[in-house]
Image (cartoon, grey):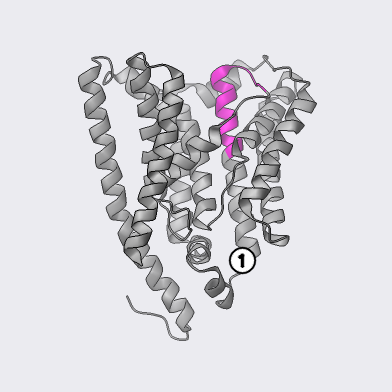
Amino acid sequence: MEYQEGENDTTKKNRKYRKITLDKFKTREIGIFIGFLFLIFIFSLLSSDFLSIGNTMDIALQSSINAALAIGMTYVIITAGIDLSVGSSLALSAYFAADLMAQGHGIVVGVLAGVIIGVIAGMVNGFIISKLSLQPFIVTLGTMSIFRGAVLVYSDGEPVYEVSASFKKVFAGYIGFIPTPVIIVGVFAIIAYIVLHHTRFGRYIIAIGGNEEAAKLSGISINKIKLGVYIIAGFASALGGLILVARLGAAEPTAGTMYELDAIAAAVMGGASLMGGAGSIVGTVIGALIMGTLRNGLTLLNVSSFYQQVLIGVVIILAVYFDQINKKKKT
């Protein structure tokens, strides 16, 4: 790759690092996709219903919410951050959207309100982390409680059941045999991929996660980029919340509990390094599909949801373990 005239050494290193990272994740994506196919093969042997068209669409549908959250989480993790508040943000934005629609304000107002609430939640996280220089883990642990408390106070613990048929048709309907949530999240994933790998903003995200000090010396506005990635995570939470409300036909103030774990697991399985500087939208989507396939296959085999939760924890630990192994190989 040729470097443009006038680039300093730091910029050249960032370009070279990005190229190496992309090449590495093409290999990682192939590996996780093979693992996904192997998982499908195993469950198809154990259950005759697994490969039916209906069940395949169910897996895609069940994976859509986690995929949306995990895409936002991937952006955050690439910057060496974490967002533990995505489940609470989902509940907060989804409840406000459903409540406004139940009051007769219409679908457009409800959806916009939900998205704005999610974006504001992301802005709060990004502002505190960037401006006050606090650790993302601590900040989002705190806002996880704040956002959850806010929706519980607003709702008084009561769910909203009056969700319009038109809203459900948009966010939980079908176009042909394909669920609309799959299409919506698919479009979101494509945009997220383009932004991450083919825009200056995406290059800056990777550069910050790879070496924040070098990125700062290159003239990158660290605070603005970090604020941006947490806003994206907030938007992803709102999107997931709208889909969840449409699917359930109701908004629960306790919705989204522990969703952050699935999102982190999908992102890390897909190649996002918890040390920052690396991540893959394609890998994250495959990771979300693996999580959905595991839950679906185990349910078909009548495995208790309690054991499924144990397995998800094991998957997270293994994903982090393999991430550490990859880091050691690089050093």
Which residue is identified by label 1?
Answer: 222
Where 73 falls versus 259 (above or below)?
below
Q: Give the residues drawn in magenta, as a range.
A: 237-252
Residue 249 in magenta stretch: yes
Residue displayed at 66% across by 40% down: 118
Q: Can see residue 83?
A: yes
Q: Nearer the viewer, residue 161 or 159?
A: 159
Q: Can see residue 176?
A: no
Please identify the quarter of the rendering in which residue 90 is found: top right
Q: Nearer the viewer, residue 233 or 262?
A: 262
Q: Position of residue 301 (x, y in %)?
A: 32, 15
Q: Position of residue 330 (x, y in %)?
A: 34, 65
Residue displayed at 38% across by 42% down: 318
Residue 233 left/right relative to 35: right
Q: Position of residue 12 (x, y in %)?
A: 42, 78
Counting the numbered discs, the total is 1
For the C terminus, the quadrant is bottom left
Residue 197 left/right relative to 103: left
For the N terminus, the quadrant is bottom left
Residue displayed at 34% across by 19% down: 55
